[in-house]
Image (tube, rainbow, N blue to C red):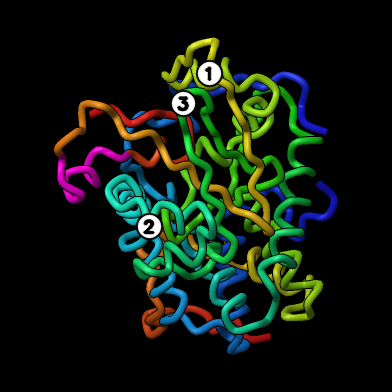
């Protein structure tokens, strides 16, 4: 079920634009999450319908648990769906996601390659993440 | 939510980064393929494709007939196909009927014609309300329709992705197909706006 009363956001981040032209992704991680799903789908790891089912579940779950004032993030639901399908399809173990994210969170302050993410890991000299 | 694989206190961008690292390390995702998908949808695929389809339909009655008959094959004639373009159904606005599209469950949208959906299309408010009170939502978005116009709301899904063929404005008489492309907005092809000349 949808939340009972939701105001249409006229001025805020979800505001309906009056013309063409807007950023497709608000933040770099959103584009990465998008690209991951597209790549996995293309290589046949899961079908788009399978991903869509997880996406619908994640969105529905958010809508049912949202409190007034909670800010909706479509790509947060997208990422949740992608995490879940990666686990249910045995692509990665659930614990490794948690552990890796925690390792990234524990990186020393100032360490940041989140902005302009590239795939050159040569500069990644502090830890090779293997366990 | 209890199904979350990561603790809430971990920033979302680190969850995304962790997932990417793990998938790339296992050889499940090729970073170059991934980057090309991102670039394509950031830069190359967008509403201009849909505008070309509309302008052609306005100037070529036979194409318009094929478009309304089978959207997917008609737009493929112009080279527009790909993910989320498999089941395109075109609905035509007329003097008496205005069509508007939503995906109530998630965000199904004809990517090859319009690119990725805008934020408002994915928003819970739009998805829930446009079905219940389309006239009010359209008015809030700047489109007030006469009472005599029937409003039809189409719910896109994995089976069908709807695309609105807007009405050609009377003032566009005499414009070339190329000139027409420029006046067709993304919002008009979703049905939350009309095309002004």
* Kind of element beneath mark 2: helix
Residue B194 place in picture, x, y as percent: 38, 29
Q: Are marks 3 and 2 in contact (CB under 8 Å)?
A: no
Which marked residue is nearer to the observer: mark 1 or mark 2?
2
Q: Residues within 10 Å of mark 3 (few under 14, many from 20)?
A: few
Q: Residue at x 59, y 46 (%)?
A: A74
Chain containing mark 3: A
Q: Earlier in the sequence, mark 1 or mark 2?
A: 2
Q: Residues within 10 Å of mark 1 (few under 14, many from 20)?
A: few
Q: Is B4 on the left-hand or right-hand side of B88? A: right
* Kind of element beneath mark 1: loop
Magenta residues? B175-184
For the view shown, which residue lies furthest in the front direction?
A: B62
Q: Residues within 10 Å of mark 2 (few under 14, many from 20)?
A: some
Q: Are marks 3 and 1 in contact (CB under 8 Å)?
A: no
Residue A47 place in picture, x, y as percent: 69, 73
Query: Magenta includes A22?
Result: no
* Residue at mark 3 shares a chain with residue at mark 2: no
* Kind of element beneath mark 3: loop
Residue A85 place in picture, x, y as percent: 74, 68
* Residue at mark 1 shares a chain with residue at mark 2: yes
Mark drawn on residue B149: 1
Residue B192 appears in the picture as rendered: yes
Q: Residue at x 46, y 59 (%)?
A: B66
Q: How many marks?
A: 3
Locate the C terminus of chain B by quadrant: top left
Residue B109 place in picture, x, y as percent: 55, 51
* C-alpha span from label 3 to label 2: 40 Å
Q: Main secondary structure of the magenta part?
A: helix
Q: Which residue is mark 2?
A: B63
Q: Which residue is mark 3?
A: A12
* C-alpha span from label 1 to label 2: 26 Å
């Amino acid at each position: 079920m949808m939340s009972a009363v939701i105001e249409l956001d006229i001025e805020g981040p979800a505001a309906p634009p009056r013309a063409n032209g807007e950023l497709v992704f608000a933040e770099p991680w959103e584009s990465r999450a998008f690209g991951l799903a597209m790549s996995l789908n293309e290589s046949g790891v899961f079908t788009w319908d399978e991903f869509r089912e997880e996406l619908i579940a994640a969105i529905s779950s958010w809508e049912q648990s949202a409190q007034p004032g909670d800010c909706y993030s479509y790509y947060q639901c997208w990422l949740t769906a992608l995490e879940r399908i990666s686990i249910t399809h045995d692509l990665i173990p659930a614990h490794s996601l948690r552990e890796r994210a925690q390792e990234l969170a524990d990186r020393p302050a100032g360490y940041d390659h989140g902005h302009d993410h590239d795939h050159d890991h040569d500069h990644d000299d502090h830890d090779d993440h293997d366990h | 939510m209890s199904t979350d694989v990561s603790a809430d206190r971990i920033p979302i961008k680190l969850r995304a980064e962790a997932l990417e690292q793990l998938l790339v390390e296992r050889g499940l995702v090729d970073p170059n393929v991934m980057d090309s998908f991102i670039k394509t949808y950031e830069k190359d695929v967008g509403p201009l494709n849909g505008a070309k389809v509309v302008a052609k339909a306005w100037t070529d009655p036979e194409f318009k007939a094929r478009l309304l008959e089978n959207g997917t094959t008609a737009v493929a004639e112009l080279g527009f196909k790909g993910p989320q373009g498999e089941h395109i159904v075109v609905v035509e606005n007329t003097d008496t009927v205005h069509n508007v599209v939503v995906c109530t469950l998630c965000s199904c949208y004809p990517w090859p014609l319009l690119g990725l959906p805008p934020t408002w299309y994915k928003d819970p408010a739009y998805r829930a309300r446009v079905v219940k009170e389309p006239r009010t939502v359209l008015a809030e978005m700047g489109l007030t329709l006469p009472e005599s116009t029937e409003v039809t709301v189409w719910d896109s899904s994995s089976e069908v992705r709807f695309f609105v063929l807007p009405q050609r404005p009377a003032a566009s008489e005499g414009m070339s197909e190329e000139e027409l492309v420029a006046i067709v907005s993304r919002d008009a092809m979703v049905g939350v706006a009309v095309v002004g000349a």
